Amino acid sequence: MTETRWLDEREQRMWRAFATMRRRLDSAMERHLNGENLSMADYQLLVPLSEAPGGRIRARELRRLAGWDRSRLSHQLRRMEQRGLVGREDCPGDARGTVIRLTSEGRSAIEAAAPGHVETVRRLFIDVLTPEEIETLTSIARRVLARIAQDTFGPGETAGTDAPVDQDPGEAACPG
Amino acid sequence: MTETRWLDEREQRMWRAFATMRRRLDSAMERHLNGENLSMADYQLLVPLSEAPGGRIRARELRRLAGWDRSRLSHQLRRMEQRGLVGREDCPGDARGTVIRLTSEGRSAIEAAAPGHVETVRRLFIDVLTPEEIETLTSIARRVLARIAQDTFGPGETAGTDAPVDQDPGEAACPG
DNA sequence: CCAAAGATGTTGATGCGTCAACATTCGGTA
DNA sequence: TACCGAATGTTGACGCATCAACATCTTTGG
Protein backbone atom coordinates (compact mmCIF):
# COMPACT_ATOMS: atom_id res chain seq x y z
CA MET A 1 0.00 0.00 0.00
CA THR A 2 1.29 3.42 -0.96
CA GLU A 3 0.30 6.49 0.94
CA THR A 4 -3.36 7.39 0.95
CA ARG A 5 -4.29 10.23 -1.35
CA TRP A 6 -6.78 12.04 0.87
CA LEU A 7 -9.28 14.44 -0.63
CA ASP A 8 -8.37 18.07 -0.86
CA GLU A 9 -10.80 20.77 0.15
CA ARG A 10 -12.54 21.15 -3.18
CA GLU A 11 -12.88 17.45 -3.69
CA GLN A 12 -14.25 16.98 -0.22
CA ARG A 13 -16.74 19.79 -0.63
CA MET A 14 -17.94 18.32 -3.90
CA TRP A 15 -18.16 14.79 -2.55
CA ARG A 16 -20.17 15.84 0.47
CA ALA A 17 -22.53 18.04 -1.48
CA PHE A 18 -22.97 15.35 -4.07
CA ALA A 19 -23.67 12.66 -1.47
CA THR A 20 -26.18 14.88 0.26
CA MET A 21 -27.89 15.69 -3.00
CA ARG A 22 -28.18 11.99 -3.78
CA ARG A 23 -29.77 11.23 -0.43
CA ARG A 24 -32.15 14.15 -0.52
CA LEU A 25 -33.19 13.47 -4.09
CA ASP A 26 -33.96 9.87 -3.22
CA SER A 27 -35.93 10.84 -0.13
CA ALA A 28 -37.89 13.49 -1.97
CA MET A 29 -38.85 11.19 -4.82
CA GLU A 30 -39.68 8.35 -2.49
CA ARG A 31 -41.83 10.73 -0.48
CA HIS A 32 -43.70 12.03 -3.50
CA LEU A 33 -44.30 8.51 -4.78
CA ASN A 34 -45.47 7.39 -1.36
CA GLY A 35 -48.24 9.94 -1.76
CA GLU A 36 -49.52 7.58 -4.44
CA ASN A 37 -48.91 4.54 -2.24
CA LEU A 38 -46.03 3.35 -4.37
CA SER A 39 -42.35 2.90 -3.60
CA MET A 40 -39.47 3.43 -6.00
CA ALA A 41 -39.12 -0.34 -6.14
CA ASP A 42 -42.76 -0.70 -7.16
CA TYR A 43 -42.32 1.99 -9.77
CA GLN A 44 -39.28 0.39 -11.34
CA LEU A 45 -41.20 -2.80 -11.96
CA LEU A 46 -44.52 -1.24 -12.89
CA VAL A 47 -43.06 0.91 -15.67
CA PRO A 48 -41.77 -1.95 -17.84
CA LEU A 49 -44.86 -3.99 -17.06
CA SER A 50 -47.13 -1.17 -18.17
CA GLU A 51 -45.25 -0.90 -21.46
CA ALA A 52 -45.32 -4.61 -22.21
CA PRO A 53 -47.98 -6.10 -24.50
CA GLY A 54 -50.74 -7.52 -22.36
CA GLY A 55 -49.01 -6.18 -19.28
CA ARG A 56 -47.11 -9.44 -19.12
CA ILE A 57 -43.37 -9.99 -18.81
CA ARG A 58 -41.52 -13.09 -17.85
CA ALA A 59 -39.70 -12.72 -14.54
CA ARG A 60 -36.38 -13.38 -16.22
CA GLU A 61 -36.92 -10.50 -18.60
CA LEU A 62 -38.20 -8.19 -15.90
CA ARG A 63 -35.11 -8.99 -13.93
CA ARG A 64 -32.97 -8.00 -16.88
CA LEU A 65 -34.89 -4.79 -17.53
CA ALA A 66 -34.68 -3.63 -13.94
CA GLY A 67 -31.12 -4.86 -13.45
CA TRP A 68 -32.06 -6.68 -10.25
CA ASP A 69 -31.05 -10.05 -8.96
CA ARG A 70 -33.40 -12.99 -8.62
CA SER A 71 -33.95 -12.72 -4.93
CA ARG A 72 -34.74 -9.05 -4.85
CA LEU A 73 -37.22 -9.44 -7.65
CA SER A 74 -38.90 -12.40 -6.05
CA HIS A 75 -39.32 -10.69 -2.71
CA GLN A 76 -40.58 -7.50 -4.29
CA LEU A 77 -43.07 -9.37 -6.46
CA ARG A 78 -44.36 -11.24 -3.43
CA ARG A 79 -45.08 -7.96 -1.66
CA MET A 80 -46.65 -6.45 -4.77
CA GLU A 81 -48.77 -9.53 -5.34
CA GLN A 82 -50.07 -9.28 -1.79
CA ARG A 83 -51.14 -5.72 -2.54
CA GLY A 84 -52.84 -6.78 -5.75
CA LEU A 85 -50.55 -4.85 -8.10
CA VAL A 86 -49.34 -7.87 -10.05
CA GLY A 87 -50.13 -11.54 -10.48
CA ARG A 88 -48.09 -14.62 -11.29
CA GLU A 89 -48.87 -16.99 -14.12
CA ASP A 90 -47.31 -20.14 -15.47
CA CYS A 91 -44.80 -19.62 -18.23
CA PRO A 92 -45.79 -21.45 -21.40
CA GLY A 93 -42.91 -23.43 -22.84
CA ASP A 94 -40.66 -23.33 -19.78
CA ALA A 95 -41.94 -24.86 -16.60
CA ARG A 96 -39.20 -23.14 -14.60
CA GLY A 97 -40.37 -19.70 -15.58
CA THR A 98 -42.97 -17.35 -14.18
CA VAL A 99 -44.90 -14.74 -16.11
CA ILE A 100 -45.69 -11.56 -14.23
CA ARG A 101 -48.97 -9.90 -15.08
CA LEU A 102 -49.92 -6.31 -14.33
CA THR A 103 -53.35 -6.22 -12.74
CA SER A 104 -55.83 -3.46 -13.44
CA GLU A 105 -55.10 -2.07 -9.98
CA GLY A 106 -51.43 -2.09 -10.89
CA ARG A 107 -52.11 -0.24 -14.11
CA SER A 108 -54.22 2.36 -12.38
CA ALA A 109 -51.52 2.86 -9.81
CA ILE A 110 -48.71 3.44 -12.30
CA GLU A 111 -50.81 5.66 -14.52
CA ALA A 112 -51.79 7.76 -11.55
CA ALA A 113 -48.25 8.04 -10.26
CA ALA A 114 -46.19 8.54 -13.40
CA PRO A 115 -46.97 12.17 -14.26
CA GLY A 116 -46.29 13.33 -10.73
CA HIS A 117 -43.09 11.37 -10.58
CA VAL A 118 -41.78 12.85 -13.80
CA GLU A 119 -42.80 16.29 -12.64
CA THR A 120 -40.81 15.75 -9.46
CA VAL A 121 -37.73 14.65 -11.36
CA ARG A 122 -38.07 17.70 -13.55
CA ARG A 123 -38.77 20.22 -10.86
CA LEU A 124 -36.13 19.05 -8.38
CA PHE A 125 -33.38 18.17 -10.79
CA ILE A 126 -33.69 18.74 -14.50
CA ASP A 127 -35.11 22.25 -14.31
CA VAL A 128 -32.11 23.54 -12.37
CA LEU A 129 -29.64 22.29 -14.98
CA THR A 130 -28.44 24.06 -18.10
CA PRO A 131 -28.35 22.07 -21.34
CA GLU A 132 -24.55 22.00 -21.08
CA GLU A 133 -24.76 20.59 -17.59
CA ILE A 134 -27.11 17.87 -18.79
CA GLU A 135 -24.54 16.83 -21.36
CA THR A 136 -21.76 17.04 -18.79
CA LEU A 137 -23.67 14.83 -16.38
CA THR A 138 -24.32 12.26 -19.05
CA SER A 139 -20.67 12.23 -19.90
CA ILE A 140 -19.61 11.94 -16.27
CA ALA A 141 -22.01 9.11 -15.58
CA ARG A 142 -20.65 7.18 -18.53
CA ARG A 143 -17.07 7.63 -17.46
CA VAL A 144 -17.82 6.62 -13.89
CA LEU A 145 -19.74 3.56 -15.00
CA ALA A 146 -16.88 2.52 -17.25
CA ARG A 147 -14.46 2.91 -14.39
CA ILE A 148 -16.63 0.90 -12.03
CA ALA A 149 -16.97 -1.87 -14.59
CA GLN A 150 -13.21 -1.94 -14.94
CA ASP A 151 -12.82 -2.04 -11.20
CA THR A 152 -15.26 -4.91 -10.75
CA PHE A 153 -13.16 -7.18 -12.90
CA GLY A 154 -9.83 -5.93 -11.70
CA PRO A 155 -9.09 -6.69 -8.05
CA GLY A 156 -12.61 -8.04 -8.02
CA GLU A 157 -14.24 -9.37 -4.91
CA THR A 158 -17.83 -10.34 -5.53
CA ALA A 159 -17.75 -10.09 -9.28
CA GLY A 160 -21.33 -10.62 -10.48
CA THR A 161 -22.54 -13.90 -9.08
CA ASP A 162 -26.07 -13.28 -10.17
CA ALA A 163 -26.98 -9.86 -11.47
CA PRO A 164 -25.91 -9.31 -15.05
CA VAL A 165 -23.91 -6.12 -15.28
CA ASP A 166 -24.19 -5.96 -19.07
CA GLN A 167 -26.93 -3.47 -19.78
CA ASP A 168 -28.80 -1.11 -17.55
CA PRO A 169 -31.97 0.57 -18.73
CA GLY A 170 -32.06 2.47 -15.47
CA GLU A 171 -35.28 4.21 -14.72
CA ALA A 172 -37.85 4.77 -17.38
CA ALA A 173 -39.79 7.97 -17.35
CA CYS A 174 -42.70 7.61 -19.75
CA PRO A 175 -45.01 4.71 -19.10
CA GLY A 176 -47.22 4.44 -22.17
CA MET B 1 -53.14 19.77 -13.21
CA THR B 2 -51.56 21.08 -16.36
CA GLU B 3 -50.14 18.76 -18.96
CA THR B 4 -47.21 16.62 -17.93
CA ARG B 5 -43.88 17.81 -19.24
CA TRP B 6 -42.30 14.47 -20.12
CA LEU B 7 -38.56 14.15 -20.49
CA ASP B 8 -37.06 14.60 -23.91
CA GLU B 9 -34.43 12.22 -25.21
CA ARG B 10 -31.42 14.02 -23.80
CA GLU B 11 -33.00 14.50 -20.43
CA GLN B 12 -34.04 10.90 -20.26
CA ARG B 13 -30.62 9.66 -21.27
CA MET B 14 -29.01 11.79 -18.60
CA TRP B 15 -31.48 10.81 -15.92
CA ARG B 16 -31.04 7.12 -16.58
CA ALA B 17 -27.28 7.29 -16.75
CA PHE B 18 -27.19 9.37 -13.61
CA ALA B 19 -29.50 7.01 -11.72
CA THR B 20 -27.43 4.03 -12.78
CA MET B 21 -24.24 5.74 -11.74
CA ARG B 22 -25.70 6.49 -8.33
CA ARG B 23 -26.70 2.88 -7.77
CA ARG B 24 -23.43 1.43 -9.00
CA LEU B 25 -21.35 3.87 -7.01
CA ASP B 26 -23.26 2.98 -3.86
CA SER B 27 -22.92 -0.74 -4.48
CA ALA B 28 -19.23 -0.49 -5.24
CA MET B 29 -18.46 1.50 -2.13
CA GLU B 30 -20.61 -0.69 0.04
CA ARG B 31 -18.84 -3.71 -1.38
CA HIS B 32 -15.39 -2.33 -0.77
CA LEU B 33 -16.28 -1.36 2.77
CA ASN B 34 -17.81 -4.77 3.38
CA GLY B 35 -14.37 -6.16 2.71
CA GLU B 36 -13.47 -4.50 6.01
CA ASN B 37 -16.66 -5.76 7.65
CA LEU B 38 -18.19 -2.31 7.78
CA SER B 39 -21.28 -0.86 6.16
CA MET B 40 -21.71 2.70 4.95
CA ALA B 41 -23.96 3.26 7.93
CA ASP B 42 -21.22 2.09 10.28
CA TYR B 43 -18.74 4.32 8.51
CA GLN B 44 -20.88 7.42 8.78
CA LEU B 45 -21.03 7.07 12.54
CA LEU B 46 -17.49 5.87 13.10
CA VAL B 47 -15.91 8.84 11.33
CA PRO B 48 -17.27 11.54 13.65
CA LEU B 49 -16.71 9.30 16.67
CA SER B 50 -13.08 8.75 15.72
CA GLU B 51 -12.58 12.50 15.43
CA ALA B 52 -14.20 13.34 18.76
CA PRO B 53 -12.11 13.85 21.89
CA GLY B 54 -12.11 10.64 23.89
CA GLY B 55 -14.05 8.96 21.10
CA ARG B 56 -17.20 10.12 22.85
CA ILE B 57 -20.17 11.98 21.37
CA ARG B 58 -23.61 12.44 22.80
CA ALA B 59 -26.25 10.70 20.72
CA ARG B 60 -28.01 13.99 20.07
CA GLU B 61 -24.86 15.45 18.57
CA LEU B 62 -24.08 12.35 16.57
CA ARG B 63 -27.56 12.51 15.20
CA ARG B 64 -26.97 16.08 14.11
CA LEU B 65 -23.60 15.31 12.57
CA ALA B 66 -24.88 12.39 10.53
CA GLY B 67 -28.18 14.08 9.68
CA TRP B 68 -30.15 11.04 10.79
CA ASP B 69 -33.35 10.75 12.75
CA ARG B 70 -33.55 9.35 16.28
CA SER B 71 -34.86 6.00 15.35
CA ARG B 72 -32.35 5.23 12.67
CA LEU B 73 -29.52 6.19 14.95
CA SER B 74 -30.82 4.13 17.83
CA HIS B 75 -31.26 1.02 15.71
CA GLN B 76 -27.86 1.40 14.10
CA LEU B 77 -26.17 1.93 17.45
CA ARG B 78 -27.83 -1.17 18.83
CA ARG B 79 -26.41 -3.25 15.98
CA MET B 80 -22.99 -1.66 16.33
CA GLU B 81 -23.00 -2.18 20.08
CA GLN B 82 -23.75 -5.86 19.58
CA ARG B 83 -20.69 -6.06 17.34
CA GLY B 84 -18.54 -4.30 19.91
CA LEU B 85 -17.84 -1.21 17.80
CA VAL B 86 -19.35 1.29 20.22
CA GLY B 87 -20.64 1.43 23.77
CA ARG B 88 -23.33 3.44 25.53
CA GLU B 89 -22.70 5.51 28.64
CA ASP B 90 -24.82 7.72 30.85
CA CYS B 91 -24.84 11.36 29.92
CA PRO B 92 -23.60 13.55 32.76
CA GLY B 93 -25.92 16.47 33.41
CA ASP B 94 -28.86 15.18 31.40
CA ALA B 95 -30.45 11.93 32.45
CA ARG B 96 -32.32 11.71 29.16
CA GLY B 97 -29.15 11.64 27.12
CA THR B 98 -26.81 8.88 26.07
CA VAL B 99 -23.12 9.23 25.35
CA ILE B 100 -21.76 7.02 22.61
CA ARG B 101 -18.22 5.77 23.06
CA LEU B 102 -15.98 4.39 20.34
CA THR B 103 -14.42 1.14 21.54
CA SER B 104 -10.88 0.15 20.65
CA GLU B 105 -12.31 -2.39 18.22
CA GLY B 106 -14.33 0.41 16.68
CA ARG B 107 -11.27 2.56 16.34
CA SER B 108 -9.26 -0.22 14.76
CA ALA B 109 -12.08 -0.87 12.32
CA ILE B 110 -12.40 2.72 11.12
CA GLU B 111 -8.68 3.24 10.90
CA ALA B 112 -8.32 0.10 8.85
CA ALA B 113 -11.18 0.99 6.54
CA ALA B 114 -10.73 4.70 5.94
CA PRO B 115 -7.77 4.73 3.52
CA GLY B 116 -9.33 2.10 1.31
CA HIS B 117 -12.64 3.90 1.31
CA VAL B 118 -11.12 7.20 0.29
CA GLU B 119 -9.10 5.43 -2.38
CA THR B 120 -12.30 3.94 -3.73
CA VAL B 121 -14.05 7.29 -3.84
CA ARG B 122 -11.07 8.72 -5.64
CA ARG B 123 -10.54 5.91 -8.10
CA LEU B 124 -14.17 5.40 -9.07
CA PHE B 125 -15.32 8.99 -9.08
CA ILE B 126 -12.97 11.87 -8.43
CA ASP B 127 -10.18 10.69 -10.69
CA VAL B 128 -12.42 10.65 -13.75
CA LEU B 129 -13.50 14.26 -13.24
CA THR B 130 -11.79 17.41 -14.48
CA PRO B 131 -11.37 20.28 -12.02
CA GLU B 132 -14.07 22.16 -13.91
CA GLU B 133 -16.43 19.24 -13.55
CA ILE B 134 -15.77 19.11 -9.83
CA GLU B 135 -16.82 22.74 -9.56
CA THR B 136 -19.82 22.13 -11.77
CA LEU B 137 -20.96 19.22 -9.63
CA THR B 138 -20.62 21.25 -6.47
CA SER B 139 -22.66 23.98 -8.02
CA ILE B 140 -25.33 21.58 -9.26
CA ALA B 141 -25.62 19.86 -5.90
CA ARG B 142 -26.15 23.19 -4.18
CA ARG B 143 -28.83 24.27 -6.62
CA VAL B 144 -30.64 20.96 -6.34
CA LEU B 145 -30.50 21.03 -2.56
CA ALA B 146 -31.88 24.54 -2.53
CA ARG B 147 -34.70 23.46 -4.80
CA ILE B 148 -35.51 20.46 -2.66
CA ALA B 149 -35.54 22.60 0.47
CA GLN B 150 -37.94 24.99 -1.24
CA ASP B 151 -40.09 22.09 -2.31
CA THR B 152 -40.24 20.59 1.16
CA PHE B 153 -41.86 23.67 2.57
CA GLY B 154 -43.99 24.43 -0.44
CA PRO B 155 -46.72 21.87 -1.08
CA GLY B 156 -45.05 20.01 1.76
CA GLU B 157 -46.24 16.66 2.94
CA THR B 158 -43.99 15.25 5.62
CA ALA B 159 -42.07 18.42 6.29
CA GLY B 160 -39.37 17.48 8.80
CA THR B 161 -41.04 15.86 11.76
CA ASP B 162 -37.79 14.80 13.29
CA ALA B 163 -34.64 15.09 11.21
CA PRO B 164 -33.32 18.60 11.16
CA VAL B 165 -32.82 19.65 7.58
CA ASP B 166 -30.72 22.64 8.48
CA GLN B 167 -27.14 21.55 8.02
CA ASP B 168 -25.70 18.44 6.48
CA PRO B 169 -22.08 17.54 6.99
CA GLY B 170 -22.59 14.63 4.64
CA GLU B 171 -19.82 12.11 4.56
CA ALA B 172 -16.49 12.89 6.07
CA ALA B 173 -13.45 11.56 4.34
CA CYS B 174 -10.49 11.95 6.67
CA PRO B 175 -10.81 10.29 10.04
CA GLY B 176 -7.84 11.56 12.02
C1' DC C 1 -31.53 -42.67 -22.24
C1' DC C 2 -29.27 -40.77 -18.13
C1' DA C 3 -26.43 -38.12 -15.22
C1' DA C 4 -24.08 -33.69 -14.66
C1' DA C 5 -24.28 -28.91 -15.26
C1' DG C 6 -26.80 -24.77 -15.88
C1' DA C 7 -30.92 -21.80 -15.62
C1' DT C 8 -34.92 -20.08 -13.10
C1' DG C 9 -37.38 -18.93 -9.02
C1' DT C 10 -38.39 -19.19 -4.00
C1' DT C 11 -37.34 -18.90 0.81
C1' DG C 12 -35.18 -17.64 5.46
C1' DA C 13 -31.95 -14.87 7.88
C1' DT C 14 -30.12 -10.58 8.58
C1' DG C 15 -28.94 -5.66 8.00
C1' DC C 16 -30.70 -1.11 6.68
C1' DG C 17 -34.35 2.65 6.93
C1' DT C 18 -38.89 4.80 8.25
C1' DC C 19 -43.06 5.38 10.86
C1' DA C 20 -45.78 5.38 14.92
C1' DA C 21 -46.05 4.61 19.74
C1' DC C 22 -43.93 4.88 24.06
C1' DA C 23 -41.17 6.08 28.52
C1' DT C 24 -38.35 9.19 30.74
C1' DT C 25 -36.54 13.60 31.84
C1' DC C 26 -36.02 18.65 31.49
C1' DG C 27 -37.77 23.39 31.58
C1' DG C 28 -40.85 26.87 32.02
C1' DT C 29 -44.91 28.66 34.28
C1' DA C 30 -48.88 29.06 37.14
C1' DT D 1 -44.53 22.87 44.15
C1' DA D 2 -47.18 20.87 40.49
C1' DC D 3 -48.16 20.67 35.88
C1' DC D 4 -47.67 20.61 30.94
C1' DG D 5 -45.19 20.75 26.79
C1' DA D 6 -40.77 19.86 24.62
C1' DA D 7 -36.67 17.13 24.13
C1' DT D 8 -34.29 12.65 24.12
C1' DG D 9 -34.02 7.88 23.28
C1' DT D 10 -35.95 3.19 22.66
C1' DT D 11 -38.85 -0.19 20.68
C1' DG D 12 -41.86 -2.92 17.35
C1' DA D 13 -43.61 -3.40 12.87
C1' DC D 14 -42.88 -3.34 8.27
C1' DG D 15 -40.76 -2.55 3.61
C1' DC D 16 -36.38 -2.75 1.09
C1' DA D 17 -31.89 -5.20 -0.16
C1' DT D 18 -28.43 -8.96 -0.10
C1' DC D 19 -26.62 -13.53 0.84
C1' DA D 20 -26.81 -18.41 1.12
C1' DA D 21 -29.42 -22.48 0.62
C1' DC D 22 -32.77 -24.85 -1.80
C1' DA D 23 -36.21 -26.99 -5.35
C1' DT D 24 -37.33 -27.57 -9.89
C1' DC D 25 -36.77 -27.81 -14.64
C1' DT D 26 -33.86 -27.67 -19.06
C1' DT D 27 -29.93 -28.58 -21.63
C1' DT D 28 -25.89 -30.91 -22.69
C1' DG D 29 -22.82 -34.68 -23.45
C1' DG D 30 -21.68 -39.40 -22.60
Image (cartoon, coloured by chain):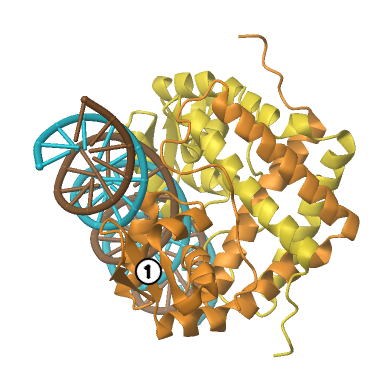
Chain colours: A yellow, B orange, C brown, D cyan
Name the amino acid, label 1.
Answer: Ile
**Residue drawn at the location 84% of the way across and 60% of the way down:** B129
Q: Disc 1: which chain? A: B
As drawn, which residue projects farthest toward the top? B2
Q: Nearer the viewer, residue C15 or C29?
A: C29
As drawn, which residue projects farthest toward the bottom? A1
**Residue drawn at the location 69% of the way across and 75% of the way down:** B119
Residue at which label 1 appears = B100
Residue B97 position (above or below residue D4): below
Residue B24 position (above or below residue A102): below
Residue B98 lies, in percent from the top left, at 32, 63
Looking at the figure, which quarter contains the C terminus of chain B? Answer: bottom right
Residue C16 lies, in percent from the top left, at 43, 58
**Residue drawn at the location 45% of the way across and 79% of the way down:** B54
* SS type, badge 1: strand
Residue B34 position (above or below residue D12): below
Q: Is residue A34 left or right of residue B172?
A: left
Q: Is residue D22 left or right of residue A122?
A: left
Disc 1: CA contacts within 10 A as few (<14), some (14-19) or many (>=20): many
Q: Nearer the viewer, residue C5 or C2?
A: C5
Residue B167 position (above or below residue A171): below
Residue A109 lies, in percent from the top left, at 46, 22
